[in-house]
Image (cartoon, rainbow, N blue to C red):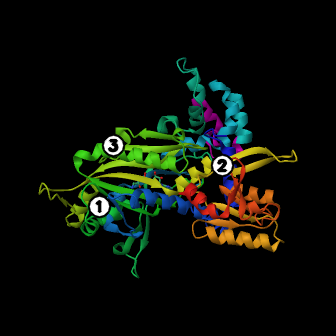
Amino acid sequence: MDRPNDPQRMERIVSLCKRRGFIFQGSEIYGGLNGVWDYGPLGVELKRNLKDYWWRVMVRERDDVVGMDGAILTHRAVLKASGHEDTFSDPMSTCRQCKRLVRADQVEEAVLETPYAKSLESVFNNGKFNGAAILRWAEREGRKLAPNMAIVRNPQVTLSWLAEHFEEASAPLVEFEDFIRYLATEQLNVTGLVMPCPNCGGDLTEARPFNLMFSTQMGASADTESIAYLRPETAQSIFVQFKNVLDTARKKLPFGIAQIGKAFRNEINPRNYIFRSREFEQMELEYFCRPEHGMELLDYWLEERLKFYENIGLPRTKLHVLTVPDADRAFYSKGTYDIEYEFPFGLQELEGVAYRTDYDLTQHQAASGKSLDYFDEDTKARFIPHVIEPSAGVDRTVLALICEAYDEETVTDEKGKSENRIVLRFHPRVAPVKAGIFPLLKNQPPLVEKAREVQALLRPLMNVFYDETGAIGRRYRRQDEAGTPFGITIDFETLGERDPGLRDTVTLRHRDSMEQERVKISELAARLSGAIA
Ligand code: GAP
């Protein structure tokens, strides 16, 4: 079940999320808006619990961090100074035939997932040349699956390159990726080997930078002066407000400013469900420090962040730390870690922990002409602080929580009947609903009344769900699928009908073990509050 690259598991998770009201496609009834998602009743609770826990441990439980909530609309000058206007881009190619846009650095990955690549696997012949089979493929499957691929449009010329390759005694075999490149290349001497369009197999243009920021017009006049951006990260408003926060919060280094909020990126290929979206939320901390403490604080924050993920139910064994190599780091960063999680579609980034040096504050000081330095009262020195930035994605973490929690098992009831149980094993801290409250029978007013009393008792403390419809087993299953850690059943024992000693006790059912115990109503609040803290 836990293997990476498990598309069936991912499909089941996506289907559960829709069926149970966690996540819906944005603007769904109008055909959907690509890369945009809406959270339903359970999803919004899960997301809120995650953000609240982050805020609690990153801000409220610390003396050295304060929070802020910056605007989404951002002055163009801010994102010019930060470098986003000039360099926040992905390389993009366009298909000359179908006009589809593709990320040039992800073409190979995308091509290998296409139906035409899958169908070519049988023609590949372990890298040994079989011209007849290739031509047959071009005539049949190729026409349907990759109509604009060179081998389909111009089979003889295209095949000749591959045949030539096989005549060279030194290169008798090809790798599968190169096999596809040969089939997509019409003018080898001019273009070299090329990767085809993942959509139609056609020719891709040279890669060009495509800026990922969404811009908008402020006010009535639509000229370049009125351009504003939807922020591509929450971090920049923290840097821009650094001085205001420093002056008002009266903090000394090291200290941090935290923010949770929306960010927008016009991703070329939004993919993997909510993993890469065009509208998403970030939880970012900018932790300002003296330059000499930068590297040690980078490691400190990495460890803090790993503990955070463990505390919400993502085991350390599923988290990987990638030390970003020098060549892949932003030029101003002295060290960056990516925290990755084993999603069903592979190991992917959840959060970056980066030592950004004094780059951002220096840039904004230079561009705005306003001082963003720090005055050290002990040494009387002025300097621009350095910054460590743990930057996490809310939506990616929500997805990791759902993927980690999803489980299916076969259970046997007391009558010996087996059934498949789908259960989301969320950590109680993040579970959308903490307890289901069930009167055993809905047509028994004393049971219903007592259940309503229990609901009123717990409601101010946690999110509970009252359900009186259907057999009790079905009600338990519905809450298992929602990831509710506790079920509270009000039955005839609660009324003290058979044993007065059991009056005002309930059945407390545990989601994961399905074990049940008798608990006094008066003890419920403390028991459950302790478990979800
Ligand atoms: N301020 C630094 C920054 O924004 P980033 O690596 O571009 O760094 C930080 O983004 C985190 O934001 C990522 O690790 C990821 O969790 C989340 N994120 C970035 N782009 C995203 C997208 N298109 N969809 C969902 N989450 C995204």
Residue under numbered circle 3: 335
* Viewer-side label of 1, 3: 3
Report the residue that reaches farthest toward the top.
169
Mark 1, secondary structure of its residue: helix
Of mark 1 and mark 3, the one earlier in the sequence is 1
Mark 3: few/some/many CA within 10 Å (<14, 14-19, 20+): many
Of mark 1 and mark 2, the one earlier in the sequence is 1
Please give the name of the residue rendered at 32% of the width and 65% of the height, measured from the top-left corner.
Answer: 78
Using the image as rendered, state which of residue 339 and residue 365 is in the foreground: 339
The magenta stretch spans which residues? 142-161
69 over 16 or under it: above or below:
below
Mark 3, secondary structure of its residue: strand
Using the image as rendered, state which of residue 43 and residue 226 is in the foreground: 43
Residue 181 placement: quadrant: top right
Q: Which mark is residue 406?
A: 2
Looking at the rendering, the quadrant in which ligand 1 lies is bottom left
Answer whether labels 3 and 2 touch (C-beta < 8 Å).
no
Report the residue that reaches farthest toward the left.
380
* Viewer-side label of 3, 2: 2
309 over 321 or under it: above or below:
below
Does 433 lie within the magenta span? no
Please give the name of the residue rendered at 33% of the width and 43% of the height, measured from the top-left corner.
Answer: 335
Residue 519 placement: quadrant: bottom right
Please state the horizontal and vertical placement of residue 344, each as a whole percent of the image: 61, 44
Residue under numbered circle 1: 81
